Each structure stands twice: as C-alpha cells, then as structure tokens.
Amino acid sequence: MATTNAPLDFTTFKNTINNQLVDTKAHTQGILPVSKTPYLDVPVSTQQDLDVAVDAARKAFLLWSKTSIEERQRLLLAFADALEKEKASFVSLLTREQGKPVCLCHGREMDC
C-alpha cells in the first residue's frame, strides 16, 4: 500500500478508486450555506463509476481478507494518524461547507 506525506488538497475533490484519484465526467457545485453562493466543484458519479469502484473494492477485499490481524492493526493505526495530521483542515472544510460550529467538528457538543 503506497503512502505519501503530502498534505491533502481540500479544494479539489475526486473519487478515490483503487488507491487513485479519479475524476468524473459530471460535476456539481457545492453551495456555502451561510451565503448561498457557489463553493467547490464536486464529482457526480454515474452507475459506471460506481461499478468500477465496487469492482476495485471487491478485489481489495480479497487481499485485505488475507492480511494478518497485526498488519491490519498497523495499517489502520497509520491511517488514523494520517487523518489526525489533517484534523485542522477537515475542521475548516466542515465549518465552511456545512456552516457547522467548530466545536461540533471536533465532536465536543457539550462545548457549544
């Protein structure tokens, strides 16, 4: 499984299929809830796009099902660590695209 230390791009969205970023033919415009203005371009998947993704997932499952518990744990913890490194960017994206308060993005509803 390939890994990268490059930061995620939170301005361009694509589908991830078979460990690759894949664009779609059709796109739609996200809307900022606070101003009702266009925000980011997002992919719209067709049935064919979905079929390709499901086929790739089925093939990946065959490999994953043969992976040891220890290796699965290592990979999942590495994935969690990678997500944690991008936490601030995820929070920023959620507050902009959903109008969600920052405290809810952190899962701290009691702080709101």
Image: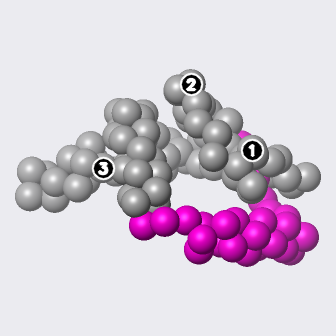
Secondary structure of the residue carrying tag 1 is strand
Span of residues in magenta: 41-69
| Residue 72 horizontal/vertical position (percent) | 46, 60
Amino acid type, label 1: Leu
| Residue 99 horizontal/vertical position (percent) | 39, 48
Secondary structure of the residue carrying tag 2 is loop
Disc sitting over residue 21 in the figure = 1
Residue at 40% in and 60% down: 70
Q: Main secondary structure of the magenta part?
A: helix
Residue 50 on the magenta span: yes
Front of the two marks 1 and 3: 1
Answer whether residue 99 is visible to the viewer in this image.
Answer: no
The correct choice, above or below, for 67 with respect to 71 in the image is below
Disc sitting over residue 6 in the figure = 2
Q: CA distance from mark 2 to mark 3?
A: 23 Å
Mark before the other along the chain sequence, 2 or 3: 2
Q: CA distance from mark 1 to mark 3?
A: 25 Å
Quarter where residue 87 is shown: top left
| Residue 60 horizontal/vertical position (percent) | 69, 66
Residue at 85% in and 52% down: 24
Mark before the other along the chain sequence, 1 or 2: 2
Residue at 9% in and 51% down: 111
The correct choice, above or below, for 39 with respect to 104 in the image is above
User: Left of 106 or right of it: where is 49?
Assistant: right
